[in-house]
Image (cartoon, helix red, strand yellow):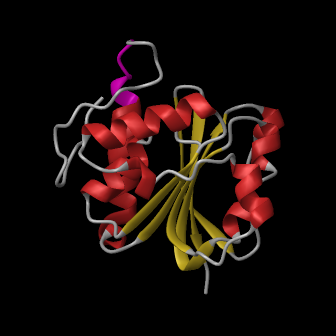
Amino acid sequence: MHIGTGQFEGKKLKDSHDGAPLSTRILTMKESIFEIIGVRIHESAVLDINDQNGMYGIEAVSKGAAVVQFINLHKEERSLVSDNLKIVGLDPNEFVIDKEPEDFFKKGTDARFDIIFFRAVDKHCLSMLERVLALQNESGITVVFHPQDNDCELREAPEGYQIIDTRDVETDRVTVMLRQK
């Protein structure tokens, strides 16, 4: 897997698929998501939650995001994100929040984000969505990745949000939501 465009274009990232290449559908999905986000990425504040290797947040930095923070449920994934930040020449200490999402939400934060990438790894993580959305800036975009099964389905947009795109790729459904003013 590699960074598609921007200052880190072509840099190869480690992934969590044990050396198996990512499908072109996943890489095409990443490109499509960034096309939807468009110029909003420039100078934006980005939160990347449970992205297994940080590819969305690192791509955001590459495309001009001002601030990117990573939070991962599993320590191994935090380590993988740190490794990938080092590959592109960034200091993980400036980007990775070294705690689980649940602990981050319990502590609370005044930070707000223009773009949030959130991977709901199971139905319990999807229940965390309300707390994730509370961190969204007005007119922000949230991209939710969730398994395509009935136990973990984002059936409709939460109040105050509009679903602007939904796509299926591999075993995930990707839902892109825009916060309404």
Residue drawn 39% across the image and 41% down it: 55
Q: In which image quadrant can residue 28 be found?
A: top left
* Residue 169, horizontal then vertical, whole percent: 50, 32
* Residue 37, horizontal then vertical, whole percent: 39, 63
Q: How many marks?
A: 0
Of residues 53 and 22, which is closer to you in this image? 53
Of residues 167 and 94, which is closer to you in this image? 94
Location of residue 98 with respect to 159 vertically, above or below: above
Horizontally, residue 25 falls left or right of residue 178, namely: left
Residue drawn 44% across the image and 52% down it: 93
Residue drawn 62% across the image and 69% down it: 162
The stretch in magenta equals: 20-25
* Residue 26, horizontal then vertical, whole percent: 41, 32
Q: Residue furthest bottom?
A: 181
Indicate yes or no whether the magenta region holds residue 33.
no
Q: In which image quadrant can residue 61 be found?
A: bottom left
In the picture, which quadrant includes the N terminus? top left
Of residues 80 and 22, which is closer to you in this image? 80
In the picture, which quadrant includes the C terminus? bottom right
Location of residue 144 with respect to 123 vertically, above or below: below
Residue drawn 80% across the image and 34% down it: 150
Horizontally, residue 68 falls left or right of residue 171, namely: left
